[in-house]
Image (cartoon, rainbow, N blue to C red):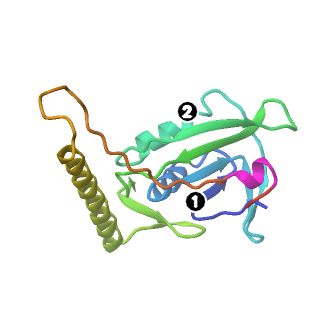
């Protein structure tokens, strides 16, 4: 059974662009997945498969929404999954990675995500998220300085580049229960 979570939501189609932008902005804090082609039964609290038509630019629409309606613009990834029941229909997965620029605004409001819904962030929540972002950047700068300090090759002897990478948490198995019928 597919349900809405802090990292996953479903939409029946791409018509509600402003609402989709708010969802994307809310997911940008921790990362998430929007699945287009799901009909929600709010009373039961679950989704049912409702494949959409694969029309021109269906895969580009979420990216256009994320780039033009979110401030700062968001980068998203899309993937089409064909329906096994009807040719020309399927599901669009929209992955919203955790953004180093989060929180993001839509129509002058910042959005966050609870366990099952998005909500406007308070000023205190926005300040806390921005302070956390600044702390993360400071840590990366400190780690980079440490790498430079511990460099085994003297400065100027050979050109080289120092890089520090820190993985952003992802949600493994986000769509596992739909793609193979199991959730672990």
Mark 1, Cα crowd under 10 Å, few <14 / some 14-19 / many 20+, is: many
Determine the residue located farthest toward the front in the rendered image.
Answer: 152
Position above or below: 129 against 140: below
The x and y percentages for residue 131 are: 27, 65
Residue drawn at x 72%, y 52% is 176
Q: Which of 71 and 147 is in front in this view?
A: 147
Horizontal arrangement in the rendering, residue 82 relative to residue 21 (left or right): right
The x and y percentages for residue 175 are: 69, 51
Horizontal arrangement in the rendering, residue 97 relative to residue 36 (left or right): left
Q: In which quarter of the image is the N terminus?
A: bottom right
Determine the residue located farthest toward the left in the rendered image.
Answer: 156
Horizontal arrangement in the rendering, residue 40 relative to residue 19 (left or right): right
Magenta stretch contains residue 179: yes
Position above or below: 7 against 55: below
Position above or below: 41 against 86: below
Q: Mark 2 points at which residue?
A: 60
Residue drawn at x 58%, y 70% is 115
Horizontal arrangement in the rendering, residue 4 relative to residue 150 (left or right): right
Q: Name the residue under label 1.
A: 7
Where, by quadrant of the figure, is residue 111 drawn?
bottom left
1 or 2: mark nearer the eye: 1
- Per the rendering, the mark at residue 67 is none
The x and y percentages for residue 35 are: 66, 49
Q: Give whichever of discs 1 and 2 has the lower sequence position.
A: 1
Q: Which of 61 and 102 is in front in this view?
A: 102
The x and y percentages for residue 171 are: 58, 55
- In magenta, the rendered stretch is 175-181
Separation of marks 1 and 2 at Cα, in angstroms:
22 Å
Secondary structure under tag 2 reads loop
Q: In which quarter of the image is the C terminus?
A: bottom right
Q: Nearer the viewer, residue 144 or 83?
A: 144
Secondary structure under tag 1 reads loop
């Amino acid at each position: 059974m597919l349900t809405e979570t802090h990292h996953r939501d479903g939409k029946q189609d791409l018509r509600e662009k402003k609402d989709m932008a708010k969802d994307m902005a809310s997911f940008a804090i921790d990362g998430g997945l929007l699945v287009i082609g799901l009909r929600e039964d709010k009373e039961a609290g679950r989704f049912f498969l409702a494949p959409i038509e694969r029309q021109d630019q269906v895969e580009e629409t979420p990216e256009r929404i994320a780039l033009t309606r979110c401030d700062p613009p968001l980068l998203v990834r899309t993937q089409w999954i064909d329906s096994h029941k009807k040719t020309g229909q399927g599901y669009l997965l929209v992955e919203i990675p955790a953004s180093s620029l989060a929180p993001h605004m839509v129509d002058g409001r910042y959005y966050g995500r609870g366990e099952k819904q998005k909500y406007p962030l308070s000023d205190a929540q926005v300040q806390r998220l921005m302070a956390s972002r600044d702390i993360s950047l400071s840590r990366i700068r400190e780690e980079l300085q440490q790498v430079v300090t511990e460099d085994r090759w003297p400065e100027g002897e050979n050109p080289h580049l120092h890089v520090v990478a820190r993985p952003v948490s992802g949600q493994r198995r986000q769509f596992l229960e739909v793609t193979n019928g199991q959730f672990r």
